[in-house]
Amino acid sequence: MSKVVTFGEIMLRLSTQRHLRFSQANNFTATYGGGEFNVAVSIANYGLEAEFVTRLPDNDLGHTALMEIKKRNVQAKNIAFGGDRLGVYFLETGAGTRGSKVVYDRANSAMATITPGTINWEEVFKDATVFHWSGVTPAVSQTAADVCLEAVKVASKMGVFITSDLNYRAKLWQYGKEPKDIMPELLSYSNVILGDLDTAFFMSGLAEEKPDYQNKASLPSLYNKLFTLYPNLEKVATTLRYSISASHQQIGGILYDNGELYSAAIKDVTPVVDRVGSGDAFMGGLIYGLLNKEYNAQQAVDFAVAACCLKHTIAGDINLVTADEVEKLMSGDASGKVAR
């Protein structure tokens, strides 16, 4: 069985209830989430082996986060303990024409203060098929970026397939470095990159070009620029999101593989329950689709888009759906009928 290892930060999520604004909230709903953890949960839900690697504080919140990881059938055997605190983020969920807001409280967290040598990557990757990381981790701190580089180097040396989600978060790059200073070396080890083309060019230090995703004929030449930059790259994927409002999203996707462009049909998602983690749901679906020997490239991107759409219907960070449920939506069944 294929095994997917992900590396990043799990955080305590505190969200307002019933679409209240921060100034209206008297209490918050506490859950756990984080980009790479969310991907690991999707993989486990689809029946594959998943392991999450992180650093947690050795206190009640850290151990509760560990319980959450294990509860989701995700392996946690290589998690390190140390540091003073668990990262936190606050979410104000928007509705209609009012967008959602996120406030981070993750400075000096256990992951932000991780240092090279903390994780035995040879041990982690000895039975791994895929290693997944995202641009959130190197945005947190220089030492987190250093550990991420340490990981991709070992994964590459050991022949592990490497996937990455660009996940640009402007609020996180606060330690004196810009993405173009850090991301190109990390991405040079990647076999799959998920992200918008303009974000990929920005993080790579290239002049930004605004792609026209409606003009499919113009896209291959833009995607090919990334293949020129990153010699290990095999596939590039892009989530297409058209925000009609906070409560109505249109979701599609593109996979550029071996010189061929595969495009998934746009799906309407309304009403939106929670869009946080939907990009991670796409990534988890894409990894599963690429590992599924019964799928071709078109089916892989179709699965990723369907998984992303379903995540919008689920509260919290993680995508609590099965492969059967995703395939049902893939097949065109969006009825939402009660299963009896």
Image: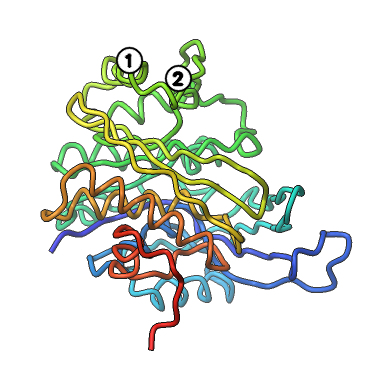
Q: x%, y% of residue 87?
A: 60, 57
Q: How would you rate the neighbour count of disc 2 (Cα within 10 Å): few for under 14, some for 14-19, many for 20 or more?
A: some
Tell me the residue at 20%/42% (across/down): 297
Q: Which residue is labeled 1 in the image?
A: 225
Inter-mark Cα distance, 2 to 1: 9 Å
Identify the residue at the far top of this view. Answer: 207
Q: Quadrant of the N terminus?
A: bottom left
Left or right of 154 on screen, residue 62: right
User: Mark 1 is on which residue type?
Assistant: Lys
Which residue occupies the foreground of this view, 227 or 154? 227
Q: Quadrant of the C terminus?
A: bottom left
Q: Which mark is residue 302?
A: none
Which residue occupies the foreground of this view, 321 or 325? 325
Tell me the residue at 49%/23% (across/down): 198
Q: Which residue is labeled 2 in the image?
A: 201
Q: Is residue 230 above or below residue 141?
A: above
